[in-house]
Image: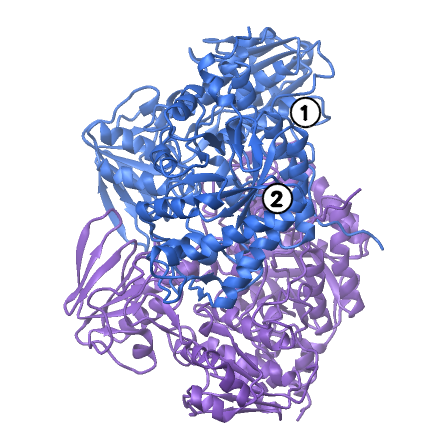
Chain colours: A purple, B blue
Amino acid sequence: MRIAREPRHDILFEPVPIGPKTLRNRFYQVPHCTGFGVDKPFSQLAHRAVKAEGGWAAVCTEYCAISPDSDDAPYVSARLWDEDDARALALVADAAHEHGALAGIELWHGGVHAEARESRWPLVAPSQLATGYRPSAVPKALERADIRRIQTDWVAAARRARAVGFDIVYVYGGHSYLPLQFLSPVLNRRGDEYGGSLENRARFWLETIELVREALGGECALAVRLSVESHGDDGVLPLEDGLAFVELADPLVDLWDVTAGGLVWPSRLDTGPSRFFAEGYQLGWTRAVRERTAKPVIGVGRFTSPDAMATAVRTGALDVIGAARPSIADPFLPRKVEEGRYGEIRECIGCNQCYARANYGRHIGCTQNPTAGEEFRRGWHPERIPAATEAAVDALVVGAGPAGLECALTLARRGLQRVHLVDAGGEPGGHFRWLTRLPGLGEWARVVGWRRIQLGRLRNVELLAELPLDAAGVLEYGADVVVCATGARWSPHGLSAVTHTPIPGAGTGLAHVLTPEQVALEGLRPPGERVLVYDGEGYLVAAGIAELLAREGYKVELVTFLEQIAPACDETLEGYPLRRRLHEAGVAMRRATVVREIHPDGAVAETEHGGRVELAASAVVLCTQRLSDDSLYHELAARPEALAARGIRALHRVGDCVSPRTAADAIFDAHRLARELESPHPALPLPHLRERFVVRAP
Amino acid sequence: MRIAREPRHDILFEPVPIGPKTLRNRFYQVPHCTGFGVDKPFSQLAHRAVKAEGGWAAVCTEYCAISPDSDDAPYVSARLWDEDDARALALVADAAHEHGALAGIELWHGGVHAEARESRWPLVAPSQLATGYRPSAVPKALERADIRRIQTDWVAAARRARAVGFDIVYVYGGHSYLPLQFLSPVLNRRGDEYGGSLENRARFWLETIELVREALGGECALAVRLSVESHGDDGVLPLEDGLAFVELADPLVDLWDVTAGGLVWPSRLDTGPSRFFAEGYQLGWTRAVRERTAKPVIGVGRFTSPDAMATAVRTGALDVIGAARPSIADPFLPRKVEEGRYGEIRECIGCNQCYARANYGRHIGCTQNPTAGEEFRRGWHPERIPAATEAAVDALVVGAGPAGLECALTLARRGLQRVHLVDAGGEPGGHFRWLTRLPGLGEWARVVGWRRIQLGRLRNVELLAELPLDAAGVLEYGADVVVCATGARWSPHGLSAVTHTPIPGAGTGLAHVLTPEQVALEGLRPPGERVLVYDGEGYLVAAGIAELLAREGYKVELVTFLEQIAPACDETLEGYPLRRRLHEAGVAMRRATVVREIHPDGAVAETEHGGRVELAASAVVLCTQRLSDDSLYHELAARPEALAARGIRALHRVGDCVSPRTAADAIFDAHRLARELESPHPALPLPHLRERFVVRAP
């Protein structure tokens, strides 16, 4: 089955010298958040270790605070404030080396963009200006002694990093952090030698680079991460200034890690979701830097296609393929390319659940890779899985949505004798059959595509379509283990979090009241021209339906009782561009409004402060709440004797038919059940390891 | 100076039997969040210990999760999942006992209102209904095996609590958590014996209470925290049902901890901010319960007045004075009442910084009590403070706002020979002179009042008003140590986080462009009738000015570039009622809008999606950004020889004149500097102790 690597991808496996070190190939895991920092050192270790094992030439920690006035609590950053921090992070360096990778550490000072809610130090910045990142924070304008102290802290952190074995040490200024706040002509209004001309604005960063370089003593490569152009309220940097800085600093730098944009919209470019940003969307900036430097350039842009990567290198857009999200979705991406196992690459879908979970949930996770973040605490490896203790087991998985696919695949990987995955429809995918047709969500189809391909490689699993099974059908079909993965559907009655009852006037069989499935899967279209899309979820579906219909020519109003349009998308960095795109598509938006009644000409609604409003519409699409399709499970569970009589020893359910949730959590649940099939109570997850301060008796 | 306790307060010091235990008096620290849980066991210990020492009859932990499907990460709750958790919490029980107090633990299952972002277990609830608390979360409807498992977990947690010495064990259901989700006729739609009639809906909670009672074996008191009435989208409970439940459960319960309302607005009543809720605002509900029970009733309501407390007990509204916030602001409140030291009570101002910091910042803090949350990590005690190592020191503090008052007071408490606190104005208070005049902020004046009273008790400190000092004046005045606490002022030019430059048309000396100080302190009023208040901060001031002017009859529009009106108030639980009150006062509100230009007839603004809008107004009040009043500090700092010549050995600054921030952080900063005056670099806070997982060499 295995094919050799395409020669056109050989370029990706050329070593790249960076100062005193050498990258073994062109794959580089750039710094990215995990929620681990130094709080969960073994989760940190294990998460980076699988990537080193998977072939990345270097793995980096997330942003690492150099001093307490750059404390980012309640968000979790790494820290190098003392020797205990250094010991925690040394685990990453050791693990990287064990697998032949380099280890990088992104030393960071956030300036006014830190939080300091733990240390309670005043935030600092070149000048006393609030920014669009967190407008209520007004910094202390740095005194000269502060500048020296921060540079001293940076050097101390660099020394610690060097001492514990890091190979690449960053002087991070990208994304509008302190060095960039100095470089910005808008945020830096100083009258001394650190402000004014470009040379003066660059002085802080250049001095810091020079001091750190000295501290590294030629033993580590010095990297700089730079947003080379930004136009946001968190710190404007014109491209010319960014490029001029590259030229000024170039002799002192071993590696340029190039990004663009800042932390706030509309100038945010980092971690661009696939709905709005295509693969390689930052190449214009890396190319611009590459033309001004003699040093290797790293760039990111959600690269998962070896062709796109090789082309980017070959055409001189960059030297090294940086990856955060693709390395989370597939830690073994480099090795798979190297070995020509292209079909096995688990491509990132650009949903940004990793970002949301790491930053707001304090523990990274991934839709495509259910083992991400679980490497240490559950002992899960992305590529290896323990064989089932009893192989002579047949499993029947009912429902081939994301959870069913994942469950069947994982059971098959564990070596069960026979796994049958059956679905009532003609195509697998469950709700992903239609979700991925909503505007911008095409890349999400990789969730289904990857699993189908892997199923096709295994001999002990079979996918059977167009095979609807009721309880009698399951009993007749037979298996040792039955797993229901029958998903969920949107309430056709408008059941929602604010009413808990059907909306008067809603119901099935009405031409003017539709569900998302009817619109996007069945192809039903609303009568008339004006459509009210009513959202109770605040994530993907209602906004997607609204945009779909608006682009078809309907006059659409998106109404929600939530305080913001699609607020869950703010955690995935999709909120701002989504609302902008909806606006551009002509979708009217109304927040904090509860629909109280539906009639053929529209709806009666209640506004934020209790007013009543009539919303004219020829139809309403209800995206209020999902309900589990759990009848099969309950019918079977109610017949234990019948199950026993047919030799069915265990009945389980996974994914949305347990509780409707994100695809990431549904896939996690399915993967977990398959891994824990032998546990005494597979429905209850086994305990995870917790990294915590443990009090012992003296 | 010390007077005896008033006899009418004696009732507060009667012991109260609760099951097998006895409260030594009627002061009870109810469960409240800290951000510590079992993550920071020594911070937890130290924070509760000072309250036990301060005379509370019982101190409780925060809500404590009994099982992984009630994991509230990323929020910090306590947990009793295993023996390590128990060992961490045992520290609290031991510390309470050491000071003669009882220790309580609030065992909790959140049902659909947990987060489970760490454990990734599905959320559970009686029925599959989303709620207004987090509408995107759709729970698993509990199977009977789940119910048994949760009850077993509850019992296991209770056993652990008993084993490590807790005296009071809760079966917590208030605030719309799992037991209340069962009790609610709206959230519980079950068809089995756990749903339907009141008896059925009460069954889960009653069974759990009974099982826990059995597990406690008569060694601990069993407490139930109950929201006796709620009408929110997170779980309606009619008062009759709540009271009927009290009667059903009464024989099994030793102590009723009574609250009302749920987690969402407008039915949220817990932790009511002083802007909207008066002292004792929950007494109607405690009284209703007290009429139905034979057991002691605890109630809360921000009680700080011994008279109000004694009256509440005497009139039968409750038996025990519960306190969260008042115990944070003054851990020694009971002892001060007991000893008749009424003037020393540091009264809570109801600003809810404690709530915001514990929940969103993961570490509690307090405006009134700068030592709150710092007991362990900085070793600060609320009542005791180390004497200065060198007493023969004179200090001059310039500026008698909150930070200056706190700094002078703390220096004086440390025993410096002489502390002079001078202010240019006639009254101390800094910006609190006018902030406290904004609608609803009257209680905030306690910040100034308490400090003035304490200064008056000390012989080594003097407050001198109407004494403006410039740099020459300071040099002439003389002192060993000079501390500038000169505060900050609102930019009269409209400098803001989104423009970083003056707004064209803004400036000083214009009748139609005002600052908050001009309106609220100087009493200037806008010309004409229509006022645009422009907010760049999102917290107190702009909304307060808008309401003030609207109540005077102006037609006010509150405009902000932020995505919500006063978003910082959402963290302090002031956002929803504030917006409602603004609406009721006739204030029009416009969010996500940037003012680009001001003219005598109004302003030109840019809307969310880039549109241009003319805003008619006869005047604009600019609440865009504060700027430190730091010129005195910088003038003095620039003259080291002059300082030396006058014997001034040290020059410092504290509070808003370093960087404008919350009063809590400014007071903290001032307190810290006074404590750390002898450190080599008092401007740099000494390192705080961190509770973390420490990696050691094997």
| Residue B310 percent coordinates (x, y) | 43, 21
Quarter holding the N terminus of chain A is: bottom right
Q: Is residue B7 above or below residue A170?
A: above
Q: Are marks 2 and 1 in contact (CB under 8 Å)?
A: no
Image position of A21 (left or right of A653)? right
Q: Residue at x 37, y 69 (%)?
A: A626
Residue A526, image quadrant = bottom left
| Residue B316 percent coordinates (x, y) | 38, 28
Q: Is residue A231 visible?
A: no
Q: Nearer the viewer, residue B336 or A306?
A: B336
Q: Residue at x 37, y 40 (%)?
A: B269
Q: In the rendered image, which residue does mark 2 sit on?
A: A71
Q: Chain of mark 2?
A: A
Q: Chain of mark 1?
A: B
Local packing at callout 2 (Cα closer than 10 Å; few below 14, some 14-19, many 20+) is many
Quarter holding the C terminus of chain A is: top right
Measured in 3D between alpha carbons, the distance from the residue under mark 2 to the one under mark 1, in whole angstroms, is: 21 Å
Q: Secondary structure at mark 2?
A: loop
Q: Nearer the viewer, residue A87 or B184?
A: B184
Q: Is residue B643 above or below residue B178?
A: above
Q: Amino acid at mark 1?
A: Glu
Q: Is residue A669 visible?
A: yes
Q: Secondary structure at mark 1?
A: loop
Q: Amino acid at mark 2?
A: Asp
Q: Which mark is residue B676?
A: 1
Q: Are marks 2 and 1 on the same chain?
A: no
| Residue B298 percent coordinates (x, y) | 45, 34
